[in-house]
């Protein structure tokens, strides 16, 4: 391991440092987050994996038996997200603080682990804007939003340092999971180990502070900023927060720890007590830092700005179900999204998820819309298939099977698998192709 790194953290952790270094090299447990917004029993498909709940809601540890988890229907259709519990704490805390309401900005969002968690925790109730400046990473964010059904999220792509010039001051909550020196991965990434230096920490610290200063300007009075990193350096963590508080008297530190987690390590007790440190030698989870700031004042979350007042139905496919979002037609494609007057003027990269496309005045549903709303799908149009057929379909193949011609949606038990065109004898695969190419994202 990088000698400079060892020197720095020996000084910081003293007698604990050997434990700390060996925890960085240890093989870690695996975890996934269950997509709870859908009310589908994905765990039933995974019954051959040794699964145990963790103390973070919806997050489970698992042992992989014969089949890798990324080849299951649950993973391929957005029922589970591979994610460490500590990475779920920041969205969990922001959801708690906002009571699952309000307009929220996720400043550094790709690949979307925290954005999809926020969306799911709030049961798609928040209006979320997710930002990612890197165009290749934006693709992975957009892919995951579509796959995990996050129809209450719209994306933008700016450097976090200029967001105050691009967005209005409308946010009840902001999540900044900042770019950082990534020390948590130093034990198993040769690149991070090689590139680590005190200079890097200082460079990241400066970048993080500039992003924080920009996005703080977007909070409404009483609004919350949750700041997190997956790195250990005090410079990028407690020190940044300390400086921000000193230089900005209209913000205060809030107690997000509430004696539930390991505390800060800066030596400033007033600060350390209120923030969260997950340390890999004291927890089985990945290292994380999380702090919460509040803009002084009373927060008034105004849901009247949401425009989904007229309830929408597509009775042919979802008889009687009232959709609480809006369907929008763009160039023959139909998108389903959350509309909110407060964000009307913002130009988005992606809005909501694709519900389907119009073909000769008929709606051809997208598979991702079925994954999200399959629970309400017309029983008369369902085709129940075996698990191996479902995996075949999700690998891009057609299915040979004779069923009534008006049936067009595949289900494995209660898990929605995808939409087909029923040609009589052949069920033609209508899965959007990027779900095949994007498998490894
Ligand atoms: C720790 S990752 C985010 C992980 C993500 N929140 C999740 O849970 O999946 C940090 C992200 O910040 C982005 N980033 C880098 N520089 C940035 C900047 N100046 N402003 C905003 N985001 C930035 C990176 O491209 C990266 O996607």
Image (cartoon, grey):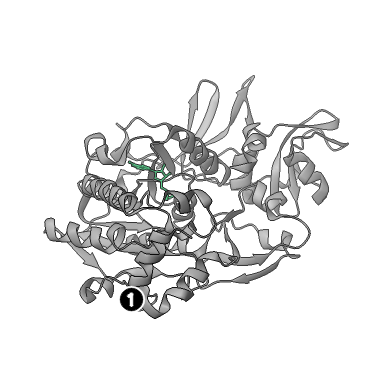
Decide: is 232 above or below 220. Answer: below
Identity of the residue drawn at 31% across and 71% down: 264
Q: Is residue 277 left or right of residue 209?
A: right
Decide: is 128 above or below 98. Answer: above
Residue nearer the viewer, 162 or 313: 162
Q: Is residue 282 left or right of residue 65?
A: left
Number of numbered discs: 1
Q: Is mark 1 within 8 Å of ligand 1?
A: no
Identity of the residue drawn at 42% across and 46% down: 109
The picture places residue 124, in percent across and down from the top left corner, at 46, 51
Decide: is 347 above or below 387. Answer: above
Q: Secondary structure at mark 1?
A: loop
Badge 1: how crowded within 10 Å, few (<14), some, or many (20+)? few
Question: Which quadrant would the C terminus be assigned to in this image?
Answer: top right
The picture places residue 252, in percent across and down from the top left corner, at 18, 63
Residue 41 visible in rendering: no
Identity of the residue drawn at 30% across and 41% down: 160
Q: Which of the 4 quarters of the picture holds residue 15?
A: bottom left
Decide: is 385 above or below 158. Answer: below
Q: Which of the 4 quarters of the picture holds residue 168?
A: top left
Residue 92 visible in rendering: yes
- State which image quarter holds ligand 1: top left
User: Label 1, on which residue?
Assistant: 258
Residue nearer the viewer, 112 or 171: 112
Q: Is residue 135 left or right of residue 292?
A: right
Residue nearer the viewer, 85 or 128: 85
Identity of the residue drawn at 42% across and 78% down: 16
The picture places residue 394, in percent across and down from the top left corner, at 72, 41
Residue nearer the viewer, 61 or 426: 61
- Residue extending farthest to the front is 3
């Amino acid at each position: 391991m990088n000698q400079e790194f060892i020197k720095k953290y020996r000084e910081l952790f003293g007698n604990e440092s050997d434990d700390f270094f060996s925890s960085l090299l240890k093989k870690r447990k695996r975890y996934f987050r269950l997509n709870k917004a859908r009310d589908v029993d994905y765990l039933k498909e995974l019954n051959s994996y040794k699964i145990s709940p963790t103390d973070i809601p919806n997050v489970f540890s698992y042992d992989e038996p014969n089949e890798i988890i990324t080849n299951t229907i649950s993973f391929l259709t957005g029922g589970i997200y591979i994610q460490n519990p500590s990475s779920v704490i920041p969205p969990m805390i922001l959801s708690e603080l906002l009571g699952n309401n309000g307009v929220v900005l996720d400043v550094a969002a790709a690949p979307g682990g925290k954005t999809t968690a926020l969306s799911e925790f709030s049961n798609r109730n928040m209006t979320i804007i997710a930002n990612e400046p890197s165009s290749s990473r934006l693709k992975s964010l957009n892919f995951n939003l579509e796959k995990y059904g996050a129809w209450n999220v719209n994306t933008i792509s700016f450097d976090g340092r200029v967001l105050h010039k691009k967005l209005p001051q409308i946010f009840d909550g902001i999540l900044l999971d900042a770019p950082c020196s990534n020390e948590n991965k130093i034990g198993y990434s040769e690149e991070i180990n090689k590139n680590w230096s005190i200079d890097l920490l200082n460079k990241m610290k400066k970048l993080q502070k500039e992003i924080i200063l920009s996005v703080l300007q977007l909070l409404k009075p009483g609004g919350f900023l949750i700041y997190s990193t997956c790195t250990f350096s005090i410079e990028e963590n407690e020190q940044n927060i300390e400086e921000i508080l000193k230089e900005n008297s209209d913000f205060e530190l809030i107690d997000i720890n509430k004696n539930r987690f390991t505390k800060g390590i800066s030596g400033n007790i007033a600060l350390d007590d209120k923030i969260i440190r997950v340390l890999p030698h004291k927890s089985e989870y990945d290292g994380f830092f999380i702090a919460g700031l509040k803009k002084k004042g009373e927060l008034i979350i105004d849901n009247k700005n949401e425009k989904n007042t007229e309830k929408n139905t597509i009775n042919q496919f979802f008889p009687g179900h009232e959709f609480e979002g809006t369907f929008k037609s763009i160039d023959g494609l139909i998108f389903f999204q959350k509309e909110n007057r407060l964000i009307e003027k913002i130009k988005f990269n992606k809005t909501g998820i694709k519900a389907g496309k119009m073909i000769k005045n008929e709606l051809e549903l997208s598979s991702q819309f079925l994954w999200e709303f399959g629970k309400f799908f017309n029983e008369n149009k369902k085709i129940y298939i075996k698990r191996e057929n479902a995996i075949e379909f999700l690998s891009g193949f057609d299915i040979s099977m004779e069923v009534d011609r008006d049936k067009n949606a595949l289900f494995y038990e209660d898990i929605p698998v995808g939409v087909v065109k029923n040609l009589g004898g052949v069920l033609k695969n209508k899965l959007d192709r990027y779900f095949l190419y994007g498998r490894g994202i």
